[in-house]
Image (tube, rainbow, N blue to C red):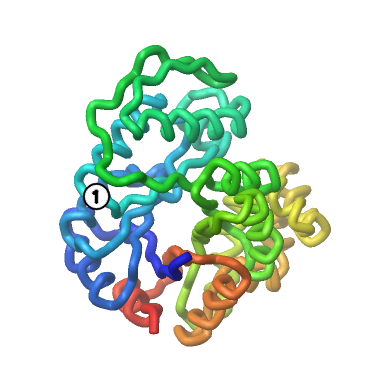
Amino acid sequence: MDQRYGMTIPFDGVPLHAQRDWIVELADLGYTDVWSSEANGADAFTPLTLASAWAPSLRLGTAIVPAFTRGPACIAQSVASLADAAPGRLAFGIGTSSNVIVEGWNGIPFEAPYQRTRDVVRFLRTALSGEKVTMETESFAVKGFKLGIVPEQPVPILVAALRAGMLELAGREGDGAIINWLSADDVATVAPIVQAAGDGTPKEMVARIFVAPTEDADMVRGMGRYAIAAYLNVPVYAAFHGWLGRGEVLGDMWRFWKAGDRKAALAAIPDHVIDELIVWGPPECCREHVQRYVDNGVTTPALALLPFGIDARQAIRDLAPR
């Protein structure tokens, strides 16, 4: 499996139309990939479409597109369109997302997330090959869909995974896994599950790694508490970190949060948890920390700059692969 080095786009606070020079510089600096996400900002496909034209050497990845918020045929059309625009350069990441995004923001029941993701992966395998698809699953039924654009080259499908069931699905039916909000040491727990499910076929491991190249410990820990609380109180992430063994150290945060005491919940997050989940410090220390993720099984670090008062343009230069 080739070792890659990616950056999350688009960059906060910069209009999409003004990011061309940033994207071109990523390629010039040696980054191999750009990865998008989808929550309440830009959709997953538009920034990658722009990047596909601006920097033809970069691979394009979604981390992730929710399995619920588009119909199966619509997902297939979006994937095929981008793959047709940038042949051989797209890696499509799909996952459950969360009840907050799916149900709270989009009004779609967040039911049977494992089955929905599995079924969409299976649908895409068939649809992207150009075959007509009729299938009835636990989560949807498709009748007679045939994709009008068939990618020239196969599109790798990666599954966003937290706990064992999804990790095994990523290895068994996906081309790899996308992992998120975990420490470098945690990778040694999750990566072997994916690789074992691959039955001898090496699987890509993409990790979104949150980075703040700054030596201001007070700022990182102050703002980091907000970022961690925002994610780790979402039920799927709370279950994930309980499974990883952080139930005791995060128990007070969860208890205060459920009681509505946000201030106490933030204060209950230990410094060492912030230091484990957020890569920060001088740029060289950040690169060494990212390397620990790689040493433990990540094949594609996808750095995500945190808006912690840093100069983002300088940060992409300072964090560039050596």
The amino acid type found where label 1 is placed reads Pro
Q: What residue does disc 1 label?
A: 87
Residues 154 and 136: in front is 154
At x 59%, y 51%, the residue is 231
The reply to whether residue 12 is in sight is no
Tell which residue pokes out farthest to the top in this image: 143
Left or right of 137? Residue 133 is: left
Examine the image and state in which quarter residue 113 appears: top right
Task: Give above or below for 171 relative to 128.
Answer: below
> Residue 39 placed where, x, y %?
43, 43
State the count of labels.
1
Residues 150 and 214: in front is 150
At x 55%, y 66%, the residue is 298
> Residue 134 placed where, x, y %?
43, 16
SS of the residue under disc 1: loop
Task: Give above or below for 230 relative to 108.
Answer: below
> Residue 50 placed where, x, y %?
20, 52
The reply to whether residue 242 is in sight is yes
Examine the image and state in which quarter residue 11 appears: bottom left
Left or right of 111? Residue 207 is: left
Tell which residue pokes out farthest to the front in this image: 200
At x 34%, y 60%, the residue is 34
Residues 75 and 2: in front is 2
> Residue 314 placed where, x, y %?
32, 78
For the C terminus, the image quarter is bottom left
Classify mark 1: residues with Cα within 10 Å, few (<14), some (14-19) or many (20+): some
Left or right of 172? Residue 204 is: left
At x 74%, y 57%, the residue is 244
